[in-house]
Structure formats: structure tokens, C-alpha cells
Image (cartoon, grey):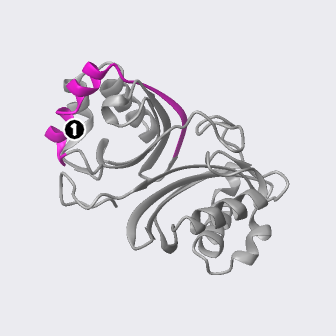
């Protein structure tokens, strides 16, 4: 199986079939877990499956991108009250090693009923194109993250994205560059000041570039998992899942 096929088989076994034996066959015994609430190792993962089955939670995967040994799933979970909210948007990142899943990172966020842009957290374009421009698109997005989100040169934003087209799926932001600026300013005025924004995981495939970043917001740790779609050399669409990083975890692996 390809890395994508392996991860999708795992997701089906865990969240659709609720089959612990199938899951166990697809992961390494020393499976490294970064979800703060799940113990590390294969046994910690297997212990989660009965709770998933009992909760009645269902999953829909909207996007799958991969690069090298990393695979990113962009999904939504319904009937997810046992995990924090009726509906959750999620990014899951898996590292594949020797035909098994060896490591996992994720971020989850409750999905609100409304959004400023009128878009949902997981709808929008899904087709992977521009595969020959993967490296170029990755560099573009990382420049945007460094200059705009990281604060190195926010005035450069128009060089990275199309202000007129930029489609926003963050529920708290409106479309366009103006929506990004206004929303970011409003968040800061509420006391949410970003003093660190450092990419930890980057996965690009064609026109899609995913970046997971370790951030500090008002002196507290946060995780920002972002996905951007690029078209003809400009960023045109954005999805994210943002969550504070808890101080206590079920393991010592950290969020990243």
C-alpha cells in the first residue's frame, strides 16, 4: 500500500469498522502519540476504539495530501460530544515507516453554527493540481507564514495571496486580505497577542500546502494547523484548526 492507502485503511479500521486487530496490524508497537489525551504506544491507541464505537461518532475525510513519509487528513467528526463538541473539524498527520504508521499528531476544534465568510470549516476545493509546482507552492506558503503570520514583514501579504479571491474557512474571519487583517486585529484587541509562530510540520502536494505551527498566544502555548490552496502563484483559499495546548498530557511526547 502507498502511504495514503495505509493511513486511510487505518482510519477506516479505527473510526468506521472499530476493529482493534486491524488497527494493531497497521501501526508500530512503539507508535508515538502526540494527541494530548491519548497515551502513547499501540495499546493507548487501541484503548480509544471502544469509546469511539460507544459514542456513535462518525468521520468524513475531505482532503488527503502526502509528501514523503507524511500524510495529512482533513476531516470532520459528527456525534463527537464525548470528545468535546457535537461536530469537530480536525487535521491528523501521520508518519509512515517501513509500511506501518509510526507517529501521529492532530488538532481538533469545535465547529460553530455560523461563520463570517459563510463557509464551513471543511468545505471548498478538494482536487489536487499543480503537482509539478509542489516545491514552488511550499516556498510561497512558508514565506507567507514567516512574513505575515510570524510578523517578520506583514506588509508583504499582497505578494503571497490574491486579496480579491482569498477564500476563508476560519469561522472567525471574513474573506479577502481585509478580512484577515480585521479579524487578526480584533483577536489581538481581545487580548490574544501572538509572540511566537514557528512551523513544525510542513506537507505539500501540488496546490495544497499544510503547516502545523507551535505558537505562543498571550504567554500560553497554542497549536495552529493550517492548510492553504495555491493557484497560479497566489494563495487563494485557507482552512485551519486552532487549539490551545494543554499543560498536562497523557504522555511525555509533547504536542509536536
Of all residues, the one furthest to the bottom in this rendering is 152
Residue 66 position, x and y percent, is 51, 47
Q: Is 142 displayed left or right of 214 in the figure? A: right
Residues rendered magenta in the picture: 39-65
Residue 103 position, x and y percent, is 30, 50
Q: Residue 8 lies in magenta, yes or no?
A: no
Q: Which residue is mark 1?
A: 45
> Residue shown at 49%/33% (left/top)?
76
Q: Is residue 144 above or below residue 244?
A: below
> Residue shown at 39%/36% (left/top)?
7
Q: Residue 53 lies in magenta, yes or no?
A: yes
> Residue shown at 18%/55% (left/top)?
251
> Residue shown at 64%/45% (left/top)?
169
Of helix, strand and loop, which one carries label 1? helix
Quadrant assignment for the C terminus: bottom left
Q: Is residue 62 above or below residue 210?
A: above
Dot 1, how many residues are within 10 Å of its Cα: few (below 14), some (14-19), or many (20+)? some
Which is more toward the observer, 36 or 179? 179
The quadrant where residue 149 appears: bottom right
Amino acid at each position: 500500500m502507498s502511504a495514503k492507502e495505509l493511513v486511510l485503511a487505518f482510519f477506516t479500521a479505527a473510526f468506521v469498522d472499530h476493529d482493534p486487530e486491524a488497527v494493531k496490524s497497521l501501526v508500530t508497537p512503539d507508535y508515538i502519540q502526540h494527541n494530548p489525551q491519548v497515551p502513547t504506544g499501540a495499546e493507548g491507541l487501541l484503548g480509544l476504539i471502544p469509546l469511539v464505537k460507544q459514542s456513535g461518532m462518525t468521520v468524513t475525510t475531505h482532503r488527503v495530501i502526502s509528501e514523503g513519509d507524511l500524510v495529512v487528513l482533513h476531516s470532520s467528526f459528527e456525534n463527537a460530544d464525548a470528545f468535546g463538541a457535537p461536530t469537530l473539524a480536525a487535521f491528523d498527520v501521520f508518519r509512515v515507516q517501513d509500511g506501518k504508521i509510526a507517529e501521529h499528531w492532530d488538532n481538533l476544534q469545535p465547529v460553530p453554527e455560523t461563520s463570517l465568510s459563510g463557509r464551513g470549516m471543511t468545505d471548498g476545493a478538494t482536487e489536487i493540481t499543480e503537482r509539478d509546482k509542489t516545491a514552488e507552492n511550499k516556498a510561497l506558503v512558508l514565506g507567507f507564514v514567516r512574513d505575515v503570520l510570524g510578523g517578520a514583514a506583514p506588509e508583504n501579504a499582497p505578494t503571497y495571496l490574491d486579496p480579491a479571491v482569498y477564500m476563508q474557512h476560519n469561522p472567525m474571519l471574513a474573506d479577502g486580505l481585509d478580512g484577515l487583517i480585521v479579524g487578526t486585529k480584533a483577536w489581538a484587541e481581545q487580548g490574544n497577542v501572538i509572540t511566537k509562530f514557528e512551523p513544525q510540520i510542513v506537507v505539500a502536494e501540488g496546490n495544497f500546502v499544510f503547516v502545523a505551527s507551535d505558537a505562543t498566544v498571550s504567554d500560553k502555548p497554542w497549536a495552529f494547523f493550517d492548510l492553504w490552496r495555491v493557484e497560479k502563484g497566489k494563495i487563494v483559499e485557507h482552512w485551519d484548526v486552532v487549539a490551545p495546548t494543554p499543560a498536562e498530557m497523557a504522555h511525555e511526547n509533547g504536542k509536536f
